[in-house]
Amino acid sequence: MAVEQPVGADIVGADVVAAVQRVFRDGVLSGRSAFAPPHESWTRPRAVDLRTRFVDQPDESSDTFLVKLRRQLDGAPDLTIVLAAELLFVNMAPLVPAQIGVAKKLQILDEVLSWNSLVEPAVPDDLKACLKGFMNGGQGFLNYRWAQFQILVLLVERLTEMAPAERNAVLNDPWRFRGECLDVQRSVGHKKGRAQIHVLLYLLFPDAFEPIASAHHKQEIIRAFADELPEVTGDDDRDLLALQRTLRVRTGERVWFYHEPWVSRWRKGSVERGQRGWLVRGNNVDGHDFVPAWLAQGYCSLSWREMPEIPADSAKRDVQRAVAEAMPESSVQSRGQAAYQLHAFLTEMQPGDLAVTVTPDEVHVGTVQGPASYDLSDGPDNARRRPVRWATADRPLRRAELPETVQVQLTRPPALYDISSVAAELAERAGLEDAVAEPLIEADVTKPLELPPVTEELAAQLMMPLPWLRETAEQLQEQRQLVFHGPPGTGKTYLARTLARHLAGPDRVQLVQFHPSYTYEDFFEGFRPVRGEDGSVVFDVLPGPFRLLAERAAKDPANPYILIVDEINRANVAKVFGELYFLLEYRDEPVTTQYSPHDPFQLPGNLFLIGTMNTADRSIALVDAAMRRRFAFRRLSPERPPVQGLLERWLHSRGLPDTAARLLAELNARLGDADRAIGPSYLMKPGVARPEGLDLIWRTQILPLLEDQLYGTGVDVEEEYGLAALRAALTEEA
């Protein structure tokens, strides 16, 4: 949650602070709207109405936040809608573009404001300039937007209930205001909106509070700097204020705890690495139930009785060597499974990580407290241990009451495996929000991901109809896999890349191109030669582009990732995808993969696939039923929208004559085959305006393509489809 502001500034994000105070503080005190002056949206009737619609009648569907909000505000008075938009401004304004871009913020605000019938509501230009943000609020500000909004609605209702004098007193006293915020949080019965309170406290009272959205980070800072305080009171905000004053006296300026030299003093170890969640099985270990002992004595353990003691923090190769020596008669798969899980338990699992274990009916959650140890006093099956502070020993979670996405993860067979993707939900239900770091507990995979809207600017860039592009994006959102298919030159790859970069950002898009020799090992994972320790060449299982992008997406569930598979039909798709075909349809369930059977793989819900398919190579009719069911198909053809008329639009936009467009239309009419038609991108080049340039493209690109397609048919391509023949036909028509 790093703050993007130079050290030494008097107030970090000063312009955003001023903007939020103008909208929120001035709105509560005066009642007047910042978006629709001189109307009054910050009044008790408006706050009550918004609470009734949003808080009292929650929408539990899987639709996106905005879709649900629109349903909840359907028929609401105009000023209730304006208040909702202003609260969303307060929620989003502090966030840096890396979390949510300025254009996306404006699109959300403009959409909400469009739901009312008032003519004038709009985000003022000076407030738009403050949407650039200054801090990273954690993934909760994206995945728990509903909880953040709930807190703001209830807080405004509470403040507008007060008499003017009391309201003014609360908004001028940081500690009274914090008390009201905490009362609101307690009233909702969960802590998913807590980051909003931390941020709002700083925005309204920057001299009293720190620009920190994470309760865990506040505690880590106090723990690291405890020797600078006369006493640690347990009130994190007051302790931070005392610490700030102490350090300011020493340095002569305000300290920002996300900048050096301060950040390296507190943000280290598991916080730097990113916390993870681990499921460790103890209920049925060769007929023994170790879970009661784990809960009573505060630990978890991993078996493999044939394995001797292996030191904690051992390197992976050392673990593999020990396993090979202890299990020489076992299969390669069994040894690989043992090495993977032992290394994870001894080395990858770290203090602060979430530990989870299950019985047939219960789930227990705790935090790892220290390194691994080896103790044979209770026998070899219970010797390899990690200390754990179990939070649910007296109040276990019920498996049947957990979301399906969580329950699926608890049924996988290994004795130990990574369940970080659902640790958020488990930590929150176990009451561990303040014991684990923000990135872990707020990675809420149960919330649907919102793809950014398709804009008029994108449609203008692509010169394609906006409704068609929006429908395409909706299909991708719904299906998660989509193929653009059509004849050569229809812009399939360009469209896929441009649309993907708009929806996911250029850093979260990757392109691979299939070809006849492309394999599962190239695409997902397989044995590859690597240099051994002694300089020799050995083979190791290495991930391919699909697995690597899936791993990136799993660590960043708040953002979409898109893999573009160019020329998807040039490879044997069923062989390349293998068992991954199953995951394209069932994202919530893991599968055992060919080269990593010890590590079941799950395809994250925020990874999308866009394929391109040249129908001149293979007709779409030949696509197998499994692929057809898993992908949505969008045809790009010169005789249909959105490609129809594209070349004319391109030429017109550059002030060029339409000769090339008319020649192409005549060519495709003569071909009479939609799958062999020639697309406009061949001619979308400045050189087509010159006769010699058009002739060069026709002779070196279009005619050779037609000769290849029509080989053996007896057609004289030059005589039938050459420029001379086409120009003569156009002259006759004129």
Image: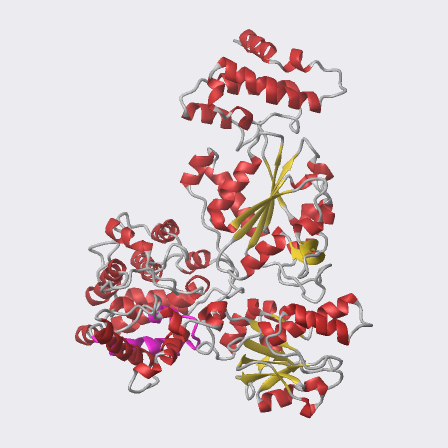
Residue in front for this viewpoint, 628 or 302: 302
Main secondary structure found in the magenta portion: helix
User: In which quarter of the view is residue 488 placed?
Assistant: top right
x and y percent of residue 255 in the render? 28, 70
Q: Quadrant of the N terminus?
A: bottom left
Q: Position of residue 733 (x, y in %)?
A: 55, 9
Q: Quadrant of residue 196?
A: bottom left
Magenta-colored stretch includes residue 703: no
| Residue 41 rendering spot, x and y as whole percentages | 26, 61
Outermost residue toward the left? 165
Residue depicted at 34% across the width and 77% down the height: 182
In the image, residue 26 sits, relative to residue 269, either above or below, namely above
Q: What residue is rendered at 51% in x and 60% in y?
A: 556
Q: Residue 126, how many percent across, how many down?
A: 24, 51
- Magenta segment: 173-198
Image side of residue 243 versus residue 343, left or right: left
